[in-house]
Image: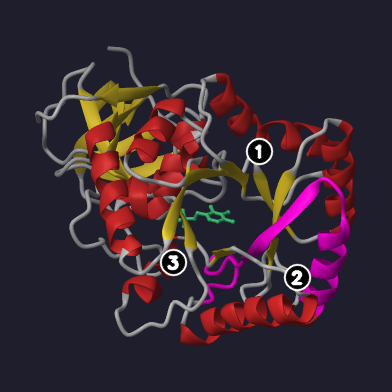
Amino acid sequence: MSTPRLEVRLDRIAHNASTLVDRLATRGIGVTAVTKATLGSPMIAHTLLAAGAVGLGESRIENIERLRAAGVTAPITLIRSPSLSQVGRVVAVADTSLNTELDVLAALSAAAQATGRRHGVILMVELGDLREGILPDDVADVARRAAALEGIELQGLGANLACQHGTVPDAVNMAALSGLVRTLEDDLQISLPVVSGGNSANLGWATDPSSDVGRVNDLRLGESILLGREPLHRQPLDGLHLDAFTLVGEVIEAKTKPSIGWGSTAQGAFGVPRHQLDRGATTRVLVALGRQDIDPDGVTPPPGFEVLGASSDHLVLDAGDRTVAIGTELRFGLDYAALLRAATSPFVPLSAQRSMDA
Ligand SMILES: *Cc1c(COP(=O)(O)O)cnc(C)c1O
């Protein structure tokens, strides 16, 4: 098989997704499974839906179009605010989008009316992470105007934490979200059936039996399903697989070389080279993977190998005193950044491993 390739064990993805779906169901929370780290892979989307996700979340319109073209009919939410230039495409393929700007809502309304569709809208509330969100004091005004627009349907409120400022979802900010929902429903005499409380970083709060989940009834989960970790401290989640994905790269050079280079030094292609320890001569291995394919800081090499650095096309590893044959396939674990980069690289095809063995 050709390398590099990103191998995915669909049975492990299914296990992670159904475990989280079951765990959150006991709290009255449904799972919107987020596919953006897989470039909107239809086979992963089918796996997530079969495992009990109520719908899909995607950040890119191209990926949603890809899912629709592959026959995915489940509800899909665009989880990044639509670009004004894409509202027509958004109403054509996404059931719902997360929104913060009245200009965008007006454009979605016009686009929906022009094609006789209804587009669902969730207003995102700023709760301190300082990425997307309407400031709490302004939500009522935006909601009132949104509710009055033809062609769009105000479905509820949402929030996103732990992405920009690292704000942790907790009893205080989640109660603020539920409180806003209740206030708006009373003041505007509307109903807000969907309250999308956050992402994988909300799992600790959501699954703690002492938490009051309030009105939150949806979480948008990506990393926790795909990699089995919570993003706040990157701790493994109980009972989940951490290794659904494996990146396979191939050795194209292996030679015993000194560990310190020679000649006068300046910057490399990607800045000042890392300081290297003098370990004497060791086996230095080049793998045909580079920054176009992975985040070199986010890959875990096999035992006995250490990542020394990477440029556009080469991953450089120290293999100690091992002998490594040219053509050897090395298998790497990935963190979220490395998964995202690999899945979106045109050089790294996704390869499904459906069998239950090995
Ligand atoms: C990426 C993203 C998610 C999913 O986040 P994970 O940490 O991968 O679960 C949810 N909501 C929004 C708005 C996102 O951008």
Left or right placement of residue 316 versus residue 106 in this view: left
Secondary structure of residue under mark 2: loop
Please determine whether, in this image, residue 196 is positioned above or below residue 215: above
Residue tagged 3:
201
Dots 3, 2 in contact, CB < 8 A: no
Ligand 1 within 8 Å, label 3 CB: yes
Using a 10 Å C-alpha cutoff, classify the residue at mark 1 as few (fewer than 14 neighbours), some (14 to 19) or many (20 or more): many
Question: Which residue sits at x=31%, y=77%?
Answer: 208
Q: Earlier in the sequence, mark 3 or mark 2?
A: 2
Looking at the picture, tell me which residue is in the foreground, 96 or 280.
96
Residue at far top of view: 1
- Quadrant of the drawing holding the N terminus: top left
- Residue 76: where, in percent of width, then height? 57, 41
Please determine whether, in this image, residue 358 is positioned above or below residue 25: above
Residue tagged 2:
134
Colouring chosen for the image of the structure: secondary structure
Distance from label 3 to label 2 (Cα)?
Answer: 20 Å
Distance from label 1 to label 2 (Cα)?
Answer: 22 Å
Identity, as a three-letter code, of the amino acid under mark 3: Ala
Distance from label 3 to label 1 (Cα)?
Answer: 24 Å
Residue 256 visible in this rendered orientation of the protein: no
Looking at the picture, tell me which residue is in the foreground, 166 or 260.
166
The residue segment tinted magenta is 138-167
- Residue 13: where, in percent of width, then height? 29, 41
Question: Which residue sits at x=24%, y=25%?
Answer: 353
Q: Nearer the viewer, mark 1 or mark 2?
A: 1
Identity, as a three-letter code, of the amino acid under mark 2: Ile
Q: Magenta stretch: residue 141 in it?
A: yes
Residue tagged 1:
94
Secondary structure of residue under mark 1: loop
Question: Which residue sits at x=87%, y=60%?
Answer: 148
- Residue 101: where, in percent of width, then height? 82, 59
